[in-house]
């Protein structure tokens, strides 16, 4: 177990010592908090910005520990763009430690926030008191980018933030944003059509982490998860048993493993229910450049293909 | 729901419950005896230290082979052995006590591990990936646990006599001949025992997670002292307590929706509390009812005068 709360102050103290003074010359220095957001910012900013992404590809933002280099990047930045909705719990401390004075843009501003999905209760209609007390229920779901409608809102916010911070290139940001939005819009239509082709009762899958609440709401897919909001939560035998019963009862077709959580529990459930593991859905982070989901758009295509293949396969 | 159903239906219906139970039984057989000897040696906190000490090994395993459980476990095992045997050797070769040298070794190891993880720049929490849970035991994990339990029991049987003597009178075996670190039988037995402890801890971490392993190892062992006097009977009691706690914890986790690992260890804690209060030897209850008798004991009278 790494004592994260112990080493953070040391790292930050180190980082502060090395942090220089931000200079205004050169490209706009932008810090994005995690890889998916970073990809959106890169699409809008292009060559006008120098982008630093704190939590890189395949990184888990839930357990992220800022390094001195991260603190330096934040201290030097002209603009910080974060997801918000409580996704980056460590961000406030990092901004404070780095003594960042500039503007912080929240990409999810204006998004209609959802609660973390209450899977078992919603779907089965047998909400018992035990399920309600489960960790994370009632908390805000931060994974808003998992719906392309929200993704478009993110892009709009990013365009505004960049244009505000760098008015000379504002026209360029708006033009690039427009092109990107059109691409997202088209993808949104394709995704909707793909799911519409599948009977509603087959649109049910299991993932190891319930990051797909917005995705499910946008495209009519039911996601069930054995573990609650955090990757740290330990499930109870009762919850796992209930999930297995549910898989058997509803004839769930596939189980998906997220790229960052322990897959052993998921494998256990698939063994028990004779479902199959459909592959890796990307939720909180992009893959590396040679992986299946190096960009936000690629991530969506990859996830949708896996899901529709699994649901329509039989 | 009948009592029989309450007790057995979960295990009949779900294979993950059966696997968890089998894993816990293997753990109880291997870890409980180790725990008894750790208590006798005043090394009860070794398990927690080991949870940190294996980090550099796991990190190096990760650097070499990526997110591969066998590589990370092997690395962790090597790091754990280095820390345990190093600390044991220093304690033998110098005047320093074992717990002190253990603290020094494991902290250094932890620092090395954090350094390696940070320089690599990966944000993946390696130990989170490495540590398993009771509900997710696959065949490989079960075989690993069973193998470790078997090795432990055979090895303990082979060194049992020397180990018991060594616990109570470390100087005795030294007088029997041989000098140097590995020359005398006592040190050899001690280091072999440490290696067994590390094997159980690291193997268990991978399959079940830290809390489960350290809890199943130590709590029954500590509780057993209130029920038994001889080492062998303490081991037997510890194993029984560990098995009872596992059964009860799994059922609680199933019926009351509690996280499984913590539920099992909580049940072990409850059994420990019962032992402290009502055990046959030196428990609160026995002391209360024996107090008047002790006051008039002839030897007490004699020592007072």
Image (cartoon, coloured by chain):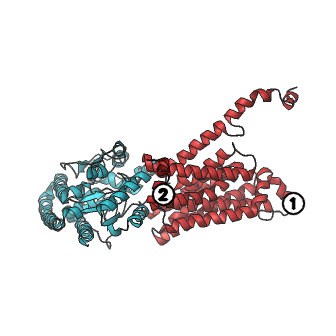
Chain colours: A cyan, B red
Residue A297 drawn at (x, y percent): 22, 66
- Front of the two marks 2 and 1: 2
Write down the quadrant of residue B85 in the picture: bottom right
Residue that carries the numbered disc 2 in the rendered image:
B11
For residue B209, side relative to residue A253 (left or right): right
Mark 2 → mark 1, Cα distance in angstroms: 52 Å
Residue that carries the numbered disc 1 in the rendered image:
B176
Callouts 2 and 1 on one subunit? yes
Question: Could you say whether the residue bearing mark 1 is in a helix, strand or loop?
Answer: loop
Whether residue B86 is visible to the viewer of this picture, yes or no, is yes
Compare marks 2 and 1 and give the one earlier in the sequence.
Answer: 2
Residue B289 lies, with reference to residue B209, above or below; the image says above
For residue A3, side relative to residue A164 (left or right): right
Residue B182 lies, with reference to residue A87, above or below; the image says below
Q: Report in which chain the residue with disc 1 lies.
A: B
A78 or B193: nearer the viewer: B193
Residue B50 drawn at (x, y percent): 59, 56
A162 or B103: nearer the viewer: B103
């Amino acid at each position: 177990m790494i004592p994260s709360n112990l080493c953070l102050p040391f790292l930050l103290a180190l980082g502060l010592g090395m942090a220089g003074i931000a200079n205004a010359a050169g490209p706009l220095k932008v810090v994005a908090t995690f890889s998916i957001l970073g990809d959106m910012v890169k699409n809008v900013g292009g060559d006008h910005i120098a982008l630093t992404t704190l939590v890189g590809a395949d990184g888990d933002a839930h357990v992220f520990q800022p390094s001195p280099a991260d603190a330096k990047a934040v201290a030097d930045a002209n603009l910080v763009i974060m997801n918000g909705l409580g996704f980056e719990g460590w961000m406030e401390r990092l901004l404070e430690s780095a003594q960042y004075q500039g503007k912080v843009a929240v990409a999810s501003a204006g998004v209609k926030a959802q609660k973390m999905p209450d899977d078992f209760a919603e779907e089965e209609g047998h909400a018992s008191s035990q399920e309600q007390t489960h960790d994370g229920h009632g908390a805000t779901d931060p994974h808003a980018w998992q719906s392309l409608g929200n993704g478009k809102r993110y892009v709009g916010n990013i365009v505004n933030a960049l244009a505000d911070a760098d008015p000379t290139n504002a026209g360029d940001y708006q033009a690039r944003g427009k092109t990107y939005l059109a691409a997202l819009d088209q993808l949104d239509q394709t995704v909707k059509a793909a799911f519409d082709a599948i009977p509603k009762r087959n649109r049910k899958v299991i993932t190891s982490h319930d990051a797909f609440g917005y995705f499910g709401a946008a495209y009519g897919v039911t996601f069930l998860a054995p573990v609650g909001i955090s990757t740290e939560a330990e499930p109870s035998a009762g919850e796992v048993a209930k999930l297995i019963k549910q898989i058997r009862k509803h004839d769930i077709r596939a189980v998906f493993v997220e790229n960052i959580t322990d897959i052993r529990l998921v494998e256990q459930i698939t063994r028990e229910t004779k479902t199959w593991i459909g592959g890796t859905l990307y939720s909180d982070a992009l893959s590396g450049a040679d992986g299946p989901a190096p960009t936000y758009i690629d991530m969506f295509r990859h996830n949708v293909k896996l899901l529709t293949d699994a649901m329509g396969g039989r | 729901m009948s009592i029989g159903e309450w007790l057995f239906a979960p295990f009949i219906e779900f294979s993950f419950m059966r696997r968890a139970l089998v894993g816990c039984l293997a753990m109880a057989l291997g870890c409980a005896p180790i725990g008894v000897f750790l208590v006798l040696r005043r090394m009860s906190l070794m398990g927690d230290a080991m949870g940190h000490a294996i980090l550099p090994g796991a990190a190096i395993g990760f650097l070499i082979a990526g997110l591969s459980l066998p590589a990370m476990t092997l690395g962790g095992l090597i790091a754990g052995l280095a820390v345990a045997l190093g600390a044991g050797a220093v304690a033998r070769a110098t005047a320093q006590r074992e717990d002190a040298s253990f603290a020094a070794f494991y902290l250094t190891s932890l620092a090395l591990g954090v350094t390696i993880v940070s320089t690599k720049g990966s944000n993946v929490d390696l130990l989170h990936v490495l540590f398993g849970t009771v509900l997710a035991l696959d065949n490989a994990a079960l075989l690993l646990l069973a193998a470790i339990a078997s090795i432990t029991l055979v090895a303990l049987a082979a060194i049992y006599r020397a180990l018991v003597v060594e616990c109570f009178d470390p100087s005795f075996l030294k007088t029997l001949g041989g000098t140097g670190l590995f020359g005398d039988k006592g040190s050899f037995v001690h280091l072999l025992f440490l290696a067994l402890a590390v094997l159980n801890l690291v193997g268990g971490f991978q399959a079940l997670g830290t809390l489960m392993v350290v809890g199943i190892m130590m709590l029954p062992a500590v509780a057993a002292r209130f029920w038994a006097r001889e080492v062998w009977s303490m081991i037997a009691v510890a194993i029984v307590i560990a098995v009872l706690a596992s059964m009860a914890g799994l059922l609680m986790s199933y019926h009351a929706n509690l996280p499984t690992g913590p539920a099992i260890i909580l049940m072990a804690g409850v059994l420990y509390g019962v032992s402290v209060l009502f055990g046959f030897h030196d428990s609160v209850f026995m002391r209360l009812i024996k107090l008047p008798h002790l006051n008039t004991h002839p030897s007490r009278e004699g020592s007072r005068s």
